[in-house]
Image: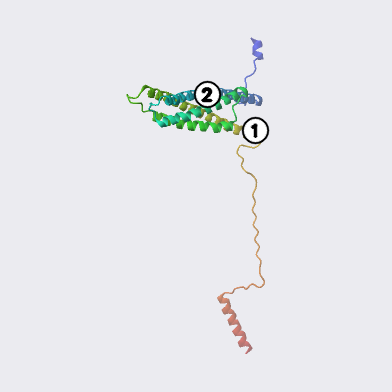
Amino acid sequence: MDHDTENTPLLINSDAGPPDVNEQTYVILSRNAAAAVFHRTTVALTWLSIGLSVSTFAFVFAVLIIYQISHGSNVNSITRESCAWLMLLGMATALISFLNLVCLYIRRKAMPLVLNLVIDPIVVFYSFGWSVTGLVENSPWCEPECDGTTKWIQTLAGIGLSFGLGLGLTHLALFLMRCVLAVRWVFEQRRNSSGPFLRIPTGQFTVEFTIKLLRQNNAVVPQSADGDERNEDITEEESRALA
C-alpha cells in the first residue's frame, strides 16, 4: 500500500495550464474525432441521396410509362411535366452521388468541394420546385367516375414526387455541412499563415505643410484715408514756410 502511494503521481494544480504537448495532442484528437463524425455523416447522406434518386426515378418513370400506355387516363399536365424533369434530375443526382461515394471510400473525401458547393444548390432548387409544384397539382384526386388507371398514376406520382422532395432535403443538409467545412478550411488556412486572420494596417502617416511669404519689390502699399489727409497738411505747411 505504501509502495503504491509513493509511486502515485502528484495531482496537477487546477490553476496551472496544461503542457503544450498535451494541449496539441488534445487538439489533434478532437479534430480527428470531428473529422470522423463528419465523414460518417457525409457517407450516410450520400447513400441516402442515391436511394432517394433511384426511388424518384423509378416511380416517376413508371408514371410516364403507364400514362403513355393508357391513353384514357386523366392526369394533370403540370404533374406529368414535373415527373419528367424529376426523372432526369434523379438520374443525374444518382450518378453524382455514386461518384462522391466512390471518392469517399477510396480517397476518404468526396469530390472537389467547390464542385459539390455548385451542384448541391442546383439539386435543392429544382427538386423543391418540381416536387412541390407537382404535388400541389396532383393533390385533387379523381372523381368517382375516374378509372382505376388514373388513380394508380396519381398514387405513383405522389410517391415519386415525395421522394424528390426528400432528395432536395438531403442535398440541403449536405450543402450546409459543406459550407461549414469550407468556412473551417478558410480559418485553418488563416491560422496556419504567419499573420492574424484580420490584418489592421499599422505605421505612421506624416503630413508636413510649408508656407512661404514672398514680398514683392514693386508692390503698392495701400494707405488709409487718414494718412492721405495728414500728408496733404504737411505739404501745405512746407509751401507756406518757403513763401
Residue at the image position 60 percent from the left and 32 percent from the top: 185
Which quadrant does the N terminus fall into?
top right
Quadrant of the image occupied by residue 222:
bottom right
Quadrant of the image occupied by residue 5:
top right
Q: Residue furthest top?
A: 1
Pick the front one: 233 or 43: 43
Q: Position of residue 58 (x, y in %)?
A: 48, 23
Q: CA distance from mark 1 to mark 2?
A: 37 Å
Reading the image, the residue beneath label 2 is 50
Sooner in the amino-acid sequence: mark 1 or mark 2: 2
Q: Residues within 10 Å of mark 1 (few under 14, many from 20)?
A: few
Q: Is residue 73 left or right of residue 8?
A: left
Image depth: mark 1 or mark 2 in front: 2
Pick the front one: 128 or 226: 128
Q: Is residue 66 left or right of residue 38?
A: left
Q: Position of residue 179 (x, y in %)?
A: 55, 32
Q: Residues within 10 Å of mark 2 (few under 14, many from 20)?
A: many
Q: Position of residue 89 (x, y in %)?
A: 50, 29
Residue 230 in sight in this render:
yes
Residue 240 disc label: none
Q: Secondary structure at mark 2?
A: helix
Q: Position of residue 88 (x, y in %)?
A: 50, 29
Reading the image, the residue beneath label 1 is 192
Q: Residue furthest left?
A: 144
